[in-house]
Image (spheres, coloured by chain):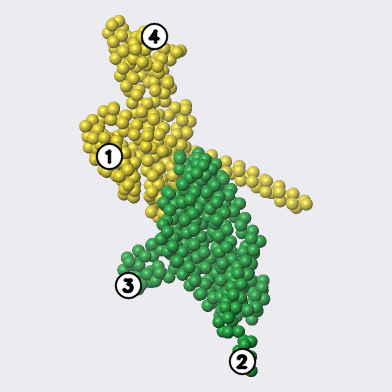
Chain colours: A green, B yellow
Amino acid sequence: MTDRIKATTPPASTEISTARSAGSRAIIAIARNAFREAVRDRVLYNLVLFVLLLIAGSMFLGELSAGQESKIIVDLGLSAMLLFGVFIAIFVGVGLVYKEIERRTLYAILSKPIGRGQFLLGKYLGLGLTLLINVAIMGVGVSLALAYIHRGWDPLVLKIWPAILLIYFELMLLTGVALLFSSFSSPALSALMTFFVFIIGHFSGDLKSLASSAGNVAARALFRALYYLLPNLTHYSVITQTAHGIAPDAGAIGLAAAYTVVYSAVLLAAATLIFGRRNFK
Amino acid sequence: MKRNALLVIQIVVGLALGVALMRVMDSRQANAPAQFAEDSLYVKAATAKRMSLAFNGLAADWYWMRSLQYVGGKIVAFKDTHEGRMDFGNLADLDLRLLPSLLQMSTTLDPQFIAPYEYGATILPEINSDYAISLLETGIAANPNQWKLYQHLGYVYWQRNEYQKASEVYAAGAKIPDAPPWMAALSARMKAEGGSRDAARDVYRHLYESSSDPKVKDMVAKQLMRLDSLDHIEVLRKILAAYSEKNARCASSWLDVRNELRAARFQIDAMTNAPLDPSDTPYRLTEKGCNVDLSQYTLVPRR
């Protein structure tokens, strides 16, 4: 009898791996759904505006910039990429959870064997995929604009891609921030707070200097804590250097990638913690 | 249907009224006193850099293009009020009071942006060479390996007739690994004969060859034309003096010295027989044929 039970019951390790693969499938399904929803919401329409901006820039900058077309196209293209991406990360990001609650589809999802953390991770990855496609198409657009201006090959065509990767990392981090705020706040407030984090994230250098120059010990401690706790987005800002043909090295990109992964993991964990305590009954 | 038509009419009429109001406001602005015509940059460059977040490069480009438009607009306005004439050697007449701030803004936002330094080095000395020196010294501090900035700083000192200082700056630039050998040669020339026309020609020729900015190239090309015309005028004066000495009167027209002009290899205008200046405009006889000057229609700057 005992032997039969042993024979029919799968071993514990198999159970865990089955549960894991089911969990991964659920995350992928939610991510795919979040991506489809973004496409349905015409988020990728921003690409049209971006392309128009680049075409106009390529046509008229020669007249206005006195031989600096390539630099200005890179500045314009990558800055627009960051700006559009930030708007998508903020405005789509804050609606990821809220919309599911508003439409009551969240109840149907959570009634299935899907954890709240898995739900949030799926949403995060879905928006990440949307941003990745958005950024990749924009990158191709900037490369084509550079080739058009140069009437052929321009070394900047290759050098812009590390900067584009860093922009993508920054957007992923901001998506995590938006997701965290949206797990406990209204979309408007979440968008506002995420935007503030974006701004403060680019003032990290000032926070650091305040931490070392403030006269009060408590103020110094506060600024130092803020410097380390808030996301430091200055490490992702290499647009200006890239426009001069200086691409970030592999070490800088690797560190930025590691920072993005670690910080996003922290944000998602915090979002899961808060979201897990919410009562949807 | 009727309501929609009313709304469309409202939009069209509203837009037309908006355009009319804009035109009235523009005309009022155009009539404003000169001291109010230019708004100053109320944001300091360092503050603008902080406020620009990750977009400082784009903001620098904006201020760079604004600098070009500012100078271009002034030139157009000047030509409009001076029958299309503009002496590019005398930019002080343009009252470019905002240009130093615009260039400083652009270079503070993006210290590695070399074009505004080059542009400033060529234009700012016409307003105040201290501005140009300050801009270039900031540029050298931010880009110590850019020999072109040393070249421009040397040029500004040379324009101020500070040949010793110019020589030192060229020598410092010559020490940069990829600096061209003529930087050291220019340094030596500044020390030996900084004020000579040949030294000037060397300075302008190297500036022309090393610059990628078409506006800078244009201005330098005009200065090279001016040097050539100074050489021309010297020779022409000698020819005219020789003629008046030989004939006890000054030349009545260029025909009187046609053979001498040919011998001196001047290009001659087929209509007037006058020698042509470097911009292909005929020189004119002055002081009843005893002297020569550039024509009022020439493109050669007078200084």
The residue to which callout 2 is attached is: A3
Same chain check for tags 2 and 1 = no
Closer to the chain start, of discs 1 and 4, is 1
Amino acid type indicated by mark 1: Tyr
Chain identity of mark 4: B
The residue to which callout 4 is attached is: B255
Q: CA distance from mark 2 to mark 1?
A: 94 Å
Observer-nearest of A149 and B38: A149
The residue to which callout 1 is attached is: B170
In this view, the mark in front (2 or 1): 2
Same chain check for tags 1 and 3 = no
Q: CA distance from mark 1 to mark 3?
A: 50 Å
In this view, the mark in front (3 or 4): 4
Q: CA distance from mark 4 to mark 2?
A: 128 Å
* Above or below, B46 relative to A67: below
Is residue B64 shown to the viewer in this render? yes
At 31% from the left edge and 13% from the top edge, which residue is drawn? B239
* Above or below, A67 relative to B1: above
Report x, y in % for residue B269: 43, 15
Chain identity of mark 2: A
The residue to which callout 3 is attached is: A217
In this view, the mark in front (2 or 3): 2
Chain identity of mark 1: B
Q: Secondary structure at mark 1?
A: helix
Chain identity of mark 3: A
* Classed neighbour count for the residue bearing mark 2: other residues with Cα under 10 Å, few (<14), some (14–19), many (≥20): few
At 26% from the left edge and 28% from the top edge, which residue is drawn? B196
Q: Is residue A66 left or right of residue A219?
A: right
At 60% from the left edge and 84% from the top edge, which residue is drawn? A10
Q: Secondary structure at mark 4?
A: helix
Report x, y in % for residue A35: 62, 64
